[in-house]
Image (cartoon, rainbow, N blue to C red):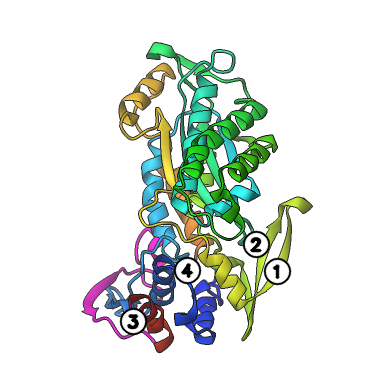
């Protein structure tokens, strides 16, 4: 696949050239994301000179920014993470459950990202664990992985949690493996109502005690009466929790994780056209039977939408729960495999992983780091060997202003 001719960095660079950055109310983390994405794999971050050990071809390779919001840098992080996850998969059917915050809470989350996103993880995890442990449903301790996405296809703020769950769990006292019914995990209506209750119960004291930022449309929540009215209205809404069709076995799960866990709000492949003032990109319209459509936004509006998905510093957007929690994963997985009568080694064979990494490299041509090795692009036989390091160069003026305005 050829490298995309248009990249996110091109759009953001146009934004920095046309805007008075020091007049914008960008957070330090948004400025950092801008700065890093604009400088990624440019001379501003330094690099090295490398040469083919067969034909002698030389080329310069610039360093990556490693910012988790940069589409160029996520493939390398994803490849390493996937190798670890392959060892955690079990030979059972897997399910995909999605928890979505209603629109009023999504708007409040923009002012309180760390708290609201944290409550989303907490309420969803407690809901899955509690309903699965209920003898009326599965009656077992499950394990699952949860991934936060904060965007919709058109870059609007749409916080939701993707949970990938093995179809079963450990019985009480860890006596056996309890499998769920084929094609059915847990009732989504029961999940939805418990999720709503748990989230609102955790949110209510934070609002009443004034521990959340409530500006603009939420200014009235400073009054206790208005807070109660607002919470009651949320409690009467139906919250969206849905279960997608089952994945199938572990190899299908790994392919899903490969494409969704290390996503950013928009990939370079979706960008179609950039003019002086507008950018056009491709998106899927889920309300219209997943039709592929195009949308054109001003560069300023596109950048505003993209930057609202910058996460708080240190916020963990991929988390494990139940028997997959970090503190007990190794022992509980060994027990699950014993009950399932499989070996303790990796469930995904090396051929499958090699094929998967090749597919990922083909779909993410902008990321050299996604390749299994650095083969010479000219002779295709030799390997590129590093000759010398290159010093950092000064960024262009527009990029430099991104940080100057922040540090002043």
Which mark is first along the chain, 1 or 2?
Answer: 2
Q: Label 2: which residue?
A: 154
Q: Label 3: which residue?
A: 43
| Tag in front: 1 or 4 | 1
Along the viewing direction, whichever of 370 and 327 lies nearer the viewer: 327
Magenta run includes residue 376 = yes
C-alpha separation, residue under disc 3 versus residue under disc 4 = 17 Å
Q: Is residue 151 visible?
A: no
Going 56% across and 47% down the picture, which residue do you hit?
A: 223
Say what secondary structure mark 3 lies in.
Answer: helix
Callout 1 crowding tier (Cα within 10 Å): few <14, some 14–19, many ≥20: few
CB atoms at circles 2 and 1 under 8 Å apart?
A: yes
Say what secondary structure mark 2 lies in.
Answer: loop
Along the viewing direction, whichever of 297 and 19 lies nearer the viewer: 19
Which mark is first along the chain, 1 or 3?
Answer: 3
**Magenta residues, start to end:** 368-396
Q: Which mark is residue 366?
A: 4
Which mark is first along the chain, 3 or 2?
Answer: 3
| Tag in front: 3 or 4 | 3
Say what secondary structure mark 4 lies in.
Answer: loop
Q: Considering only vertical position in the picture, is 229 above or below 94?
A: below
Q: Position of residue 314 (x, y in %)?
A: 35, 53
C-alpha separation, residue under disc 3 versus residue under disc 1 = 33 Å
Which mark is first along the chain, 4 or 1?
Answer: 1
Classified by dominant secondary structure, the portion drawn in magenta counts as loop
Going 40% across and 23% down the picture, which residue do you hit?
A: 342
Which mark is first along the chain, 4 or 3?
Answer: 3
Q: Label 1: which residue?
A: 295
Magenta run includes residue 75 = no
C-alpha separation, residue under disc 1 versus residue under disc 4 = 23 Å
CB atoms at circles 1 and 4 under 8 Å apart?
A: no
In this view, the residue farthest toward the right is 288
């Amino acid at each position: 696949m050829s490298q995309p001719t248009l990249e996110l960095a091109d759009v953001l660079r146009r934004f920095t050239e046309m805007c008075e950055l020091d007049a914008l109310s960008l957070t330090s983390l948004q400025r950092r994301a801008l700065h890093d994405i604009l400088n990624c794999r440019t001379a501003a971050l330094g690099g090295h000179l490398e040469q083919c050990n067969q034909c002698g071809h030389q080329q310069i390779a610039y360093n990556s920014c490693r910012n988790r919001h940069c589409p160029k840098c996520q493939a390398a992080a994803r490849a390493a993470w996937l190798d670890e996850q392959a060892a955690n998969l079990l030979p059972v059917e897997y399910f995909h459950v999605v928890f979505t915050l209603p629109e009023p809470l999504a708007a409040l989350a923009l002012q309180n990202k760390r708290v609201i996103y944290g409550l989303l993880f907490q309420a969803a995890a407690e809901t899955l664990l509690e309903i699965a442990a209920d003898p009326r449903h599965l009656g077992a301790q499950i394990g699952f992985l949860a991934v936060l996405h904060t965007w919709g296809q058109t870059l609007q703020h749409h916080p939701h949690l993707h949970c990938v769950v093995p179809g079963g769990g450990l019985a009480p006292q860890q006596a056996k493996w309890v499998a769920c019914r084929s094609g059915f995990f847990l009732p989504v209506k029961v999940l939805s109502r418990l999720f709503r209750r748990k989230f609102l119960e955790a949110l209510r004291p934070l609002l009443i005690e004034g521990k959340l930022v409530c500006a603009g449309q939420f200014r009235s929540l400073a009054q206790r009466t208005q807070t109660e009215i607002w919470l009651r209205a949320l409690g009467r809404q139906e919250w969206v929790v849905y279960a997608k069709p089952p994945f199938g076995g572990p190899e299908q799960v790994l392919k899903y994780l490969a494409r969704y866990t290390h996503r950013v709000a928009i990939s370079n492949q979706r960008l179609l056209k950039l003019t002086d003032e507008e950018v056009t990109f491709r998106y899927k319209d889920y309300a219209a039977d997943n039709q592929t459509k195009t949308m054109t936004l001003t560069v300023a509006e596109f950048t505003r939408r993209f930057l609202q998905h910058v996460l708080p510093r240190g916020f963990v957007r991929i988390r494990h729960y139940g028997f997959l929690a970090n503190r007990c994963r190794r022992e509980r997985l060994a027990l699950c495999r014993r009950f399932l009568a499989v070996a303790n080694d990796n469930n995904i064979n090396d051929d499958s992983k090699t094929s998967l990494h090749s597919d990922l490299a083909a779909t993410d041509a902008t990321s050299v780091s996604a390749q299994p090795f650095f083969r010479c692009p000219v002779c295709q036989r030799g390997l590129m060997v590093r000759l010398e390091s290159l010093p950092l160069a000064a960024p262009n003026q527009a990029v430099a202003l991104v940080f100057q305005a922040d540090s002043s």
